[in-house]
Image: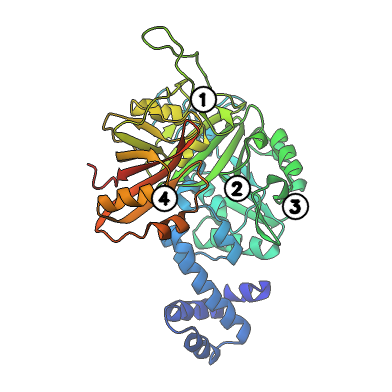
Amino acid sequence: MDHDAFLALLTPRGQKALAEAVELASGDPVVAATRLRRTYDAALTSAALTQAKLRERGRAKFGDDAALMYFTPHGVEQATRREVAEHRARRIALLAARPPAVPASPHEIPSTPQGAPPRPGSRLRVVDVCSGIGGDLVALARAGCEVDAVDTDPLTVSVALANADALGLSDRVTVRTADAASVDPAAYDVLFADPARRTAKGRTFDPNAYSPTWPVILDLLERAPAACLKVAPGIPYEFVPPGAEAEWVSFKGEVKEAAIWTGALSGMAVDAGQAETDAGGRAVPRARIGEAAAGAAEFDRRATLLPEGGTLTPTGAQAPVGPVGRYVYEPDGAAIRAHLVAEVAAMVNGRLADPLIAYITGDDLVDTVWASRYEVNEVMPFSVKKLRAALRARNVGNVTIKKRASAVDIERLRSDLRLSGNISAVVILTRISDRPSVLICTPPELGK
């Protein structure tokens, strides 16, 4: 998007062009462009039509605000969903007032953050060093913070400024073109950073390829009295600074992102606890999920569910390992990433069929927002031929296939099964005691 064309879009004439483009956006794009070109030049026509389409895309993340906001293609893709940004902003805003003895909402951290003392009644000063189109600075400003934001791209800065103005937040927000490395985080109460996770080749999952670079980010975190760093949910654990808190956020069952909290905003205490024993005094096998044993991380961990607002932190729970029971529970991805599978297992009185895989099994019928539940109909060693015969015997024609620790290609398996029945089932491909296994389950809506 051309910067000059975007600035023209903010003029009275540009606003009129944009309003017309929004009305025409749902129709034939050629017809829309032709009609606008009768009144406006090519650059303004293109900018208006592009913005109308981006506003429609932005609605999924920003709701009704999208109708007033401005976007860039990369900006709307990387922007934080409004509900997630508001969750973080509420937590950051807690530094401006001493939290009550009992948290007033599930979004509040469980104790007064250590570090900079609370300043009741004051407006928190936040520096946003990677403002993008301004989704996070809007949430921060609405939470009562004063935000000084920077970005290296002049167009993006203009978009962020326009969004603050469109949403009536200009009195709390400044945005300027600058490099993150030029910012002194010690001059603010809180540092917020959402580094770009795109390169010329597309999205990157390597923190070393972030922009600003990882060394710059770490330097900013070290000098900030409190900080929140937005990262991809798949960030390797070794990149989380010791002593920080990592929070994984799931929105409607999908893990959207992770946030690293440092300084005065890292207030969660972790107690890994002692090894549990059974009634006979024997040690219960400890659940180990992924690369590290539960509780072995050198940083604090938290999982959060939105829009419910539930939050889960380590309790010292240790999941036993045992045979597959009547039900299998699939923990929410945020709990898995935060190494809190044992805590979810405790909620459902469950156990792990395999100590390295995050499927929980049990005999009790328990409803929890932290896991999806399926009723187990059959467990067998994995074999396409045997699985096909078992599903056909049950008159299954529609399968939802899930897998963990399985190398099976799901789409190829679906084709190889050649099912034609009228019953639905869930097929879980996993490993039990190092053996490829399959569980045939009843879908949750049918298993109640």
Question: First in sequence: mark 3 or mark 1?
Answer: 1
Q: Residues within 10 Å of mark 1 (few under 14, many from 20)?
A: many
Amino acid type, mark 1: Thr
Front in this rendered view, residue 169 or 160: 160
**Residue 234 found in image quarter:** top right
Tell me the distance, in whole angstroms, between the alpha carbons under discs 2 and 1.
Answer: 23 Å
Relative to 70, is 322 above or below? above
The label number, if any, that marks residue 147 in the structure image:
2
Question: First in sequence: mark 3 or mark 2?
Answer: 2
User: In the rendered image, which quarter contains the C terminus?
Assistant: top left
Tell me the distance, in whole angstroms, between the alpha carbons under discs 3 and 1.
Answer: 32 Å
Report the residue at 51% width, 63% height from top: 166
Element at badge 1? loop
Are discs 3 and 2 less than 8 Å apart at CB? no
Question: First in sequence: mark 4 or mark 3?
Answer: 3
Q: Label 3: which residue?
A: 179
Report the residue at 55% width, 34% height from top: 290
Tell me the distance, in whole angstroms, between the alpha carbons under discs 4 and 3.
Answer: 56 Å
